Image (cartoon, grey):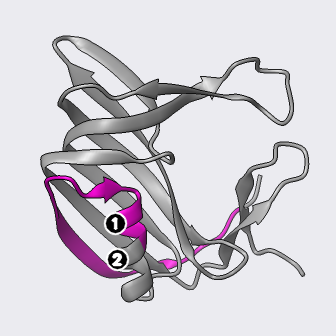
Amino acid sequence: MQVGEGKIGRVFMIRLEDGDIVPDCLEKFAAEKKIVNGFVMLVGGISGGQIVVGPRKTEEMPPDPMLLPVDEAHEVAGVGTIAPDQSGKPVIHIHAALGRAGQTMTGCLRPGVNTWLVGEAIIYEILGMNAKRLPDKKSGFSLLTINPKF
């Protein structure tokens, strides 16, 4: 386990417009506001795009991601973290539950989903944290690394 401690800095309330792509638009916002580390909450509507719903086989490394399309409008509730990649670009890792007509799918929004009508996000900036997303050789992912040593 890796642990870091920080303090809440600025707090942003964001209204996403119809067609905005999550997580792209939130990462662009984080870059513009120079948010290095943070926490994201998301509610609203999603329609279009795809989500990662797990690896095809748990034991295979690197994993082969299973993707599901998001057809038609879904309700969404999600949470995520913000940390920079090796180049310093903010990257959001956000998972969400998407529901429609009594059915729910849950997954990672990394491949990108489109806002339907409106989305609302809250970003809490975390100050004093030293967390980055660094490449992991085994998984092939960029994993959150707290207090990385170079």
Quadrant in which residue 32 is drawn: bottom left
Relative to 86, residue 3 above or below: above
Mark 1 neighbour density, 10 Å: few (under 14) some (14–19) many (20 or more): few
Is residue 149 toward the left or the right of residue 82 in the image?
Answer: right
> Under tag 1, what secondary structure?
helix
Residue lying at 69% horizontally and 81% vertically, measured from the top left: 87
The mark found on residue 139 in the picture is: none
- Residue to which mark 2 is pinned: 29
Alpha carbon of mark 2 to alpha carbon of mark 1: how far? 6 Å
Instruction: Name the side, left or right, on which 81 lies relative to 29.
Output: right
Q: Which residue is most to the top?
A: 102
- Is residue 148 covered in magenta? no
SS at mark 2 in the image: helix
Amino acid marked by disc 2: Phe
Is the Cβ of the residue at disc 2 closer than 8 Å to that at disc 1?
yes
Span shown in magenta: 3-27
Residue 26 pos. (x, y %): 36, 66
Density class for disc 2 (Cα within 10 Å; few <14, some 14-19, many ≥20) is some
Using the rendered view, name the quadrant where residue 40 is placed.
bottom left
Judged left or right of residue 83, residue 1 is right
Query: Is residue 138 depicted above or below 18 in this figure?
Result: above
The C terminus is located in which quarter?
A: bottom right
Residue under label 1: 25
Report the amino acid beneath label 1: Cys
Q: Residue at x 70, y 19 (%)?
A: 56
Q: Foreground: 139 or 124?
A: 139
Residue visible at 20% across and 26% down? Answer: 72
Q: Position of residue 124 (x, y in %)?
A: 35, 71
Seen at 52% across and 81% down, the residue is: 36
